[in-house]
Amino acid sequence: MALIRKQDKDENGKKPPSGRGETALKKKDAGKKPAPRTDKKPVQVKKDAAGRLNRARGYFRGVYNELKKVHWPTRREVLTYTGVVVVAVTIVGILIWIFDSLMSQILKLIIR
C-alpha cells in the first residue's frame, strides 16, 4: 500500500493525477494559492484602561517574582570579578600592543 503525503493531496483529500512525479494542476488553478483556513474565532481585545492597568500590574508582578530568584553577588564577589576583568583586559591590551609594534617594524623594513 502506497502512503500519500499530506502535501500530495488536493483539497478533497484525494491524490491528484501524477505527471512525472509532479502535481498536475489545471491551468486556471496554477497561479492561485489556497485560501488559509481560519478555524479559530477572533480574539476580542479589551480597549479599556482597566484591562491595560491589570496587564501592566501582572507584568510588574512577574518581574518582581523573577528578581527574587536572582542570585545577587556579594560586595567581595563583585570586587573579585571586577579585578579579574581589569587584569584580563590589561593583559590582552599589552599583547595587542606588542603584536602591533612588531608588525609596524616588519612593515617598515619591507617598505624600505
Image (cartoon, helix red, strand yellow):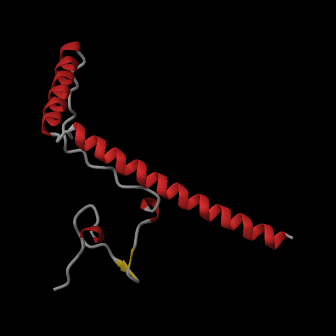
- Residue 88 relative to residue 1: left or right: right
Rendering coords of residue 98 (x, y %): 60, 62
In the image, 65 versus 81, the foreground residue is 81
Image point 31% across, 72% down: which residue?
A: 16
Image point 40% across, 68% down: which residue?
A: 25
In which quadrant of the rendered image does the N terminus lie?
A: bottom left
Residue furthest to the top: 49
Image point 18% across, 37% down: which residue?
A: 41
User: In the rendered view, would you say 78 is above or below 87?
Assistant: above
In the image, 38 versus 61, the foreground residue is 61
Number of numbered discs overlaid on the protein picture: 0
Rendering coords of residue 34 (x, y %): 35, 55
User: In the rendered view, would you say 24 is above or below 100?
Assistant: below
Image point 17% across, 42% down: which residue?
A: 71
- Residue 97 relative to residue 103: left or right: left
Rendering coords of residue 44 (x, y %): 20, 27
In the image, 71 versus 80, the foreground residue is 80
Question: Which of the 4 quarters of the picture holds residue 64?
Answer: top left
Residue furthest to the right: 112
In the image, 75 versus 27, the foreground residue is 75
Rendering coords of residue 95 (x, y %): 54, 61
In which quadrant of the rendered image does the C terminus lie?
A: bottom right
Question: Which of the 4 quarters of the picture holds residue 100?
Answer: bottom right
User: In the rendered view, would you say 98 is above or below 2?
Assistant: above
